[in-house]
């Protein structure tokens, strides 16, 4: 699997990449065998929504994998990555890159953490020493005699290994019998002989900690912390301290605050550049966007990396642990992924000396990246290529791309399909919404070369997808699930309602105090805008979403019942009071922010919960609803779904319920991923009478 960078004008493109050419610097791929379906006369016998398509559910389920964090051993240069496997009951495998290919080095383990419930930061590697956590919340140290004792109440994540290989620092999350959850930073000692030592607490007293990281010499460490009711993307602070590891007490000396204020801090990373090891790079959104800053430990000075603030985000909300979207080259420059103000994504080269930014690759949405030598490793995708683990070979001067080699592709299910014929490419949409404001999203029109509707005047049905979070975003990635719908004659609109990430803090803060209003209006106004411009059938519009997007779906059914003909809520929220009482610590005060309840009296809070909870507006719901839920969901417990189902049934409404046993907050098993999409499509077709 290989990609090469070319510069040319736009021509016909294949998903295989054999002919991929666009304007400016782009990537030419040769990762698939180009075997397109045989051409035949265009079929006009089937309506939009029932086109036949070679894109099956296996393209995003059974034949697909989830590509996660990349690990680089700084001492040996070896590369590892995490890989979610739906076909193996959702197991997360740790895969080593060897001279002969890939090797699953922990075939019996699922390397996944559950700290903050959303997990992340489940493994670290240095000098052939591997530290990881499995789904039982047990920490393991490979090739060493020490192992942290298994515990049913303590969880660990976000590891970093000391250069001496004698210590590991991590987040510890302790779930007490009384329901209290305590978070702290701990040092795990690896040189205590045959008997494992209990981890030493080195920082405590705050509600949350993230990004514990050693500098190259191991003399100092950094971390980010914050307290409720804040979230890490609303107000957090960056700290450093001298690490004194010669005692089992794990003493931190000379503690200093690096960044603190009415802003968020994310992704602190110590420089690995020779002569600059005392520098700490981090993202901070005090300008309204996440820009990068440099802190010099010797001088105590903090300076921006760019001469002028950039209107784009170099980081995002830390829903999961261990995110890294920038890294250092040996010459001191930094390769970084970032969003742009219009919601698109890029990879750029930053020069701290000249405070300048140079484009490197356009259109790449990056999940994770790491640098090893002159190579960039990244998990990314574009609007015309699926997410892949890629090795980017840089030029000798380290200022350009020589070639890109796909090492692992998230799906082969789109192989052989001409992009120009089959792939619906994300179209950025800006549309008017309430109060004279504009909102955003990505529109995907139907795309199938073998079908046309019976009449030229026919318009396609629309599926509006509301992302979760709600502090998250939909991105312009080639998503096989979307192509499954568009190749069957559906239009899809991923709405980035007010509150979404990638458009700056002001846009993200638009949802504060208005959840259930702004998101609902933006999703409805986006659909109505597309209908008014003649791109979709206004009588056949569907709305769907998962988690917070599921809440938006239910809220639309309750408060804007005349816009959509049908809806599907996936692990969505229907009762805000119940959610506030039962949800986990990480989001336990999130409602204070997005509902604006922080300064209200208990009576006012109760009234607001009632007013914004779809469960209390069942009599207004006339939209047929499909409700999908995981039985083991700890973020949105299944009682939320079942309350809604029973309430609708009791009033004679139309509702279908599907419970996925053994699933949590989302689907990990291939059979459930497939089943969920198939059930949703069949429900829409039936209710819309297509």
Image (cartoon, grey):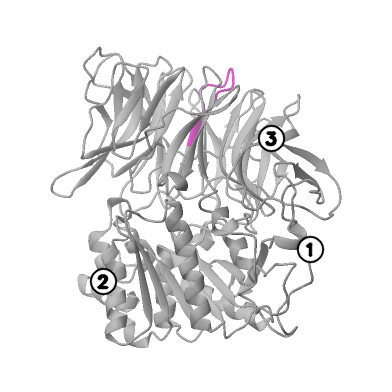
**Disc ID at residue 605:** 2
Where residue 598 appears, as percent x and y from the top left, is 30, 64
Q: How many numbered marks, from 0 up?
A: 3
Q: CA distance from mark 2 to mark 1?
A: 61 Å
**Disc ID at residue 405:** 3
The answer to whether residue 685 is left or right of residue 160 is right
Residue that carries the numbered disc 1 in the rendered image: 39
**Most prominent secondary structure in the magenta stretch?**
loop
Q: Closer to us: mark 3 or mark 1?
A: 1
The answer to whether residue 163 is left or right of residue 436 is left
State whether residue 82 is above or below residue 46: above
| Disc nearer the start of the sequence (3/2) | 3
Q: Which residues are magenta?
A: 268-280
Q: Verify CB contact (< 8 Å) between mark 3 and mark 1.
A: no
Q: Nearer the viewer, residue 74 or 295?
A: 74
The answer to whether residue 251 is left or right of residue 382 is left
Residue at screen point 35% across, 85% down:
653
Where residue 172 appears, as percent x and y from the top left, is 28, 36
State whether residue 422 is above or below residue 50: above
Q: Is residue 213 visible?
A: no
Q: Residues within 10 Å of mark 3 (few under 14, many from 20)?
A: some
Q: Secondary structure at mark 3?
A: strand
As for residue 278 lying within the magenta part, the answer is yes
| Disc nearer the start of the sequence (3/1) | 1
Q: Closer to us: mark 3 or mark 2?
A: 3
Q: Quadrant of residue 335?
A: top right
């Amino acid at each position: 699997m290989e990609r090469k960078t070319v510069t040319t004008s736009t021509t016909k493109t294949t998903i295989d990449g054999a002919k991929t050419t666009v304007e400016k610097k782009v990537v030419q791929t040769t990762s698939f065998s180009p075997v397109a379906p045989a051409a035949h006369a265009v079929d006009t016998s089937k309506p939009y929504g029932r086109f036949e398509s070679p894109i099956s559910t296996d393209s995003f389920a059974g034949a697909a994998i989830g590509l996660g964090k990349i690990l680089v051993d700084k001492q040996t240069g070896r590369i590892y990555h995490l890989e979610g496997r739906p076909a193996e009951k959702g197991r997360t495998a740790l895969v080593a890159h060897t001279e002969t290919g890939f090797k699953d080095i922990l075939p019996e383990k699922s390397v996944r953490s559950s700290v903050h419930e959303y997990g992340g930061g489940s493994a670290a590697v240095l000098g052939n020493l591997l530290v990881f956590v499995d789904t039982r919340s047990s920490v393991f140290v490979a090739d060493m005699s020490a192992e942290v004792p298994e515990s049913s109440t303590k969880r660990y994540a976000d590891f970093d290994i000391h250069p001496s290989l004698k210590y590991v620092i991590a987040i510890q999350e302790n779930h007490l019998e009384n329901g209290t959850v305590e978070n702290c930073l701990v040092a795990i000692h690896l040189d205590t002989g045959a008997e494992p030592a209990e981890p030493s607490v080195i920082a405590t007293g705050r509600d949350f900690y993230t990004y514990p990281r050693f500098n190259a010499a191991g003399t100092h460490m950094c971390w980010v912390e914050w307290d409720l009711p804040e979230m890490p993307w609303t107000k957090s602070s960056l700290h450093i301290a001298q690490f004194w590891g010669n005692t089992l007490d794990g003493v931190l000396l000379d503690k200093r605050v690096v960044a603190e204020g009415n802003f968020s801090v994310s992704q602190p990373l110590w420089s690995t550049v020779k002569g600059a090891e005392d520098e700490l790079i981090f993202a901070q959104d005090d300008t309204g966007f996440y820009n990068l800053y440099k802190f010099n430990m010797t001088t105590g000075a903090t300076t921006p990396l760019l001469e002028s603030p950039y209107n784009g985000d170099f980081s995002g909300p830390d829903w999961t642990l261990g995110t890294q979207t920038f890294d250092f080259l040996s010459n001191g420059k930094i390769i970084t992924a970032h969003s742009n103000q219009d919601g698109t994504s890029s990879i750029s080269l930053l020069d701290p000396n000249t405070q300048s930014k140079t484009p490197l690759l356009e259109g790449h949405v990056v999940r994770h990246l790491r640098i090893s030598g002159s190579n960039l490793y990244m998990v990314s995708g574009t609007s015309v290529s699926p997410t892949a683990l890629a090795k980017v070979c840089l030029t000798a001067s380290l200022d350009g791309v020589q070639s890109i080699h796909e090492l692992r592709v998230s799906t082969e299910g789109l192989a052989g399909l001409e992009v120009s014929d089959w792939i619906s490419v994300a179209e950025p949409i800006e549309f008017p919404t309430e109060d004279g404001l504009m909102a955003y999203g990505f529109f995907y029109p139907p795309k199938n070369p073998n079908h046309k509707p019976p009449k030229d005047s026919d318009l396609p049905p629309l599926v509006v997808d509301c992302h979760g979070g709600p502090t998250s975003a939909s991105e312009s990635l080639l998503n096989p699930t979307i192509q499954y719908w568009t190749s069957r004659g559906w239009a899809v609109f991923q709405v980035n309602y007010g509150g979404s990430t990638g458009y700056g803090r002001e846009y993200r803060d638009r949802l504060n105090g208005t959840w259930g209003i702004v998101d609902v209006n933006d999703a409805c106004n986006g659909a109505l805008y597309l209908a008014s411009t003649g791109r979709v059938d206004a009588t056949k519009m569907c709305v769907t979403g998962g988690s917070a997007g599921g809440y938006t779906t239910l809220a639309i059914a309750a408060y804007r019942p005349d816009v959509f003909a049908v809806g599907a809520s996936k692990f969505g929220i229907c009762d805000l009071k119940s959610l506030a009482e039962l949800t986990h610590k990480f989001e336990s005060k999130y409602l204070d922010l997005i509902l604006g309840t922080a300064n209200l009296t208990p009576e006012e809070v109760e009234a607001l919960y009632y007013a914004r909870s779809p469960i209390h507006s069942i009599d207004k719901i006339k939209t047929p609803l499909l409700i999908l839920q995981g039985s083991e969901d700890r973020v949105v417990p299944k009682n939320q779904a079942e309350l809604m189902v029973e309430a609708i049934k009791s009033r004679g409404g139309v509702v279908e319920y599907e419970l996925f046993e053994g699933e949590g907050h989302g689907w990990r098993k291939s059979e459930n991923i497939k089943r969920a999409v198939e059930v949703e499509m069949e429900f829409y077709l039936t209710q819309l009478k297509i």
